[in-house]
Every structure is written in structure tokens, then in C-alpha cells.
Amino acid sequence: MARRPRIAIVGRFTEQATAIRSLGVVSSRRLLESVWAAGGEPVTFLPVENPNWAERLVGIDGVLIPGGGDVNPKWYGEEPNTEELYGVDDLQDENDFSIAKHAFDNALPVLAICRGFQLVNVLKGGSLVQDMDQHHRNHMHTITIDKDAEGLGLSKPVLESSCFHHQAIKELGSGLEVLARAEEGHVEAFKIEAKAWSYGVQWHPEDNYKENPQQLELFTKFVSVAAKN
């Protein structure tokens, strides 16, 4: 039996976790289960100073950049302009930026979700709306993939998607091809110019993958590409 492709996920710092007594590093259970259901082996990595991804990612087949708190606006040349910012942590940002850049430069497949999607846009020189006029927290909506649905692994270009975000892309970064937009106009999916399969989505496909097979198709495509790495 072939081994499961190993998918790296940088853990998220948390001040609250019922299973431990104090500070923690976590990954979303639903996200890990999505990767597992798609045939992958999710592996959570501790964010550290000077992470040395070239050494730590030996044996890793793909990188998933997950949701989480907000990216520090300083990375896109702005000062905070809203009290809605939350979870800002420079060490978290630095680890996400560096693992994404390493993956893009070294032909590791990448799937970026929500915060990860926004972070890749910033990495590529883009900026963010720090607080949307209408938040998409606990928001379900229909998304139409205008092109390259096949690249995302989707059998149909229209899918019901679950969102939880209050920020959106303002200025699009370089090397990003828009594949879908929300009704309000903000970007919901893009293809990333890189040496391997690399895509980002603003929604959370892990939220309803059990009820909506199309969401699992996205993870299945990612894991299947990683298996060939």
C-alpha cells in the first residue's frame, strides 16, 4: 500500500484550548480531517524563529497554508485602521510567508485557504481591505469558478461555499490569476504562478466537505498532485 502524501500545515498560536492548561499551538480538526479524507497525512509544524524549511520539510509532499488571525498590515505598507483586527502575530506571519515562498521556489504543491489566501496575496506584493463593509463571517454563498475549475479539481464550476472572514483582497499581487469573484466583487479564488500546482481560495472548503463532495474534490486534487511530487 502506497504511503499517504505528507502535507505540512504551520500550527496556529492560541491562548485558549480546553485540552491543555495554557498557551497552545493548534490546527483545525476539520481541516486535518479534510486532508485525511482526501488521502493525505496532515503534519502540523511549530512556528519558530529561523524555521529552516529546507531542512524541516524533507519528506513533505505539499504545503497547506490555513486560516487563522489577521496578517499584520505593516507587511503591505499600512498602519492598522480598524479595531476589528485580531490574532496578529509577527512570528506567525513570518513562518507563513517563509514556508509559502519556500514551497513556491522548490516545486512543492500549495493550497492556501482564507488567511493563507490573503497572506499569499501580500507575499506577492498585494494588499488587503482591513475590514469589509459587510463581513463574511458564518456566511454561505454560491461561488462560480469563471475559469480553470479543472485545475482546482472541481467537477462543476458552481459550488456552495462556507466563509469566515472580515478582510478581502484590495490590490491583487503579481503572478496571481483570478479564477472567481464574490457577488460583491472581491476575489474568491486564484491560481498562483509557481513551479508546482498552487492555488488559493478565500472560503473554507473544510467546513462542509462531508455534505458537499465538491469541497472534498479540492483537497483530493491537492493531495493527488502532492502524491506525484
Image (cartoon, grey):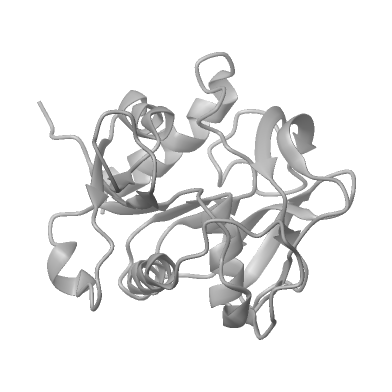
| 12 lies left or right of 171 | left
The location of residue 6, given as percent across then percent down, is 22, 44
Residue occupying image coordinates x 60% and y 81%: 74
In the depicted view, which residue is nearer to us: 150 or 13?
13
The picture quadrant where one finds residue 155 is: top right
Report if residue 166 is visible in the image: yes
Q: Residue furthest front?
A: 21
Give above or below for 102 relative to 57: below
In the depicted view, which residue is nearer to us: 122 or 179?
122
| 26 lies left or right of 93 | left
| 94 lies left or right of 6 | right
Residue occupying image coordinates x 26% and y 29%: 19
Residue occupying image coordinates x 71% and y 56%: 84
Quadrant of the image for the N terminus?
A: top left
Q: Residue furthest top?
A: 211
The location of residue 134, given as percent across then percent down, is 86, 46
The location of residue 229, given as percent across then percent down, is 26, 54
Report if residue 192 is visible in the image: no
Q: Residue furthest left?
A: 1
Give above or below for 209 relative to 3: above
Residue occupying image coordinates x 69% and y 81%: 79
The location of residue 27, given as percent across then percent down, is 35, 41
Give above or below for 76 relative to 23: below
The picture quadrant where one finds residue 95 is: bottom left
